[in-house]
Amino acid sequence: MPNPKRRHSQQRSAKRRTHYKATIDTLSTDKTTGEMHMRHRAHWVENKMFYRGRVVMEKPVKDEAPAEENEA
């Protein structure tokens, strides 16, 4: 494996690391629902998954069953 012949200076390492920085995610408003969401990501609104303004998937809603049916 090749190794550096001499040690890199701290300044040289710091220059390289200046380009690593946190960025704020870009948000968009969905034209269909009006919700804010991250760009290029699907998002849930009222048990429906939207992507690019279209419904991609729906989450089935479970019916509320009574807690105690066999009380006899």
Image: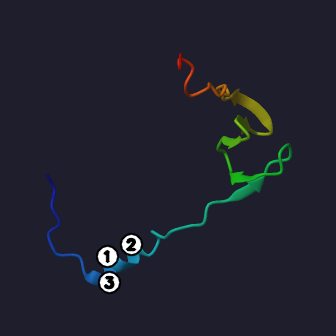
Q: Amino acid at mark 1?
A: Ser
The residue type indicated by label 2 comes to: Arg
* Disc 3: CA contacts within 10 A as few (<14), some (14-19) or many (>=20): few
Disc 3: which residue: 11
Q: Are marks 2 and 3 in contact (CB under 8 Å)?
A: no
Could you tell me residue 1's position as x and y percent? 13, 52
- In the picture as drawn, the residue positioned furthest to the front comes out as 72
Q: Contact (CB < 8 A) between labels 3 and 1?
A: yes
Asked which quadrant contains residue 3, the reply is bottom left
Label 1 secondary element: helix
In this rendering, would 1 be left or right of 36?
left
Q: Position of residue 40 (x, y in %)?
A: 66, 45
| Disc 1 + disc 2, Cβ < 8 Å | yes
> Residue 32's x, y, as percent?
85, 43
Q: Position of residue 2 (x, y in %)?
A: 16, 56
Q: How is the image coloured?
A: rainbow
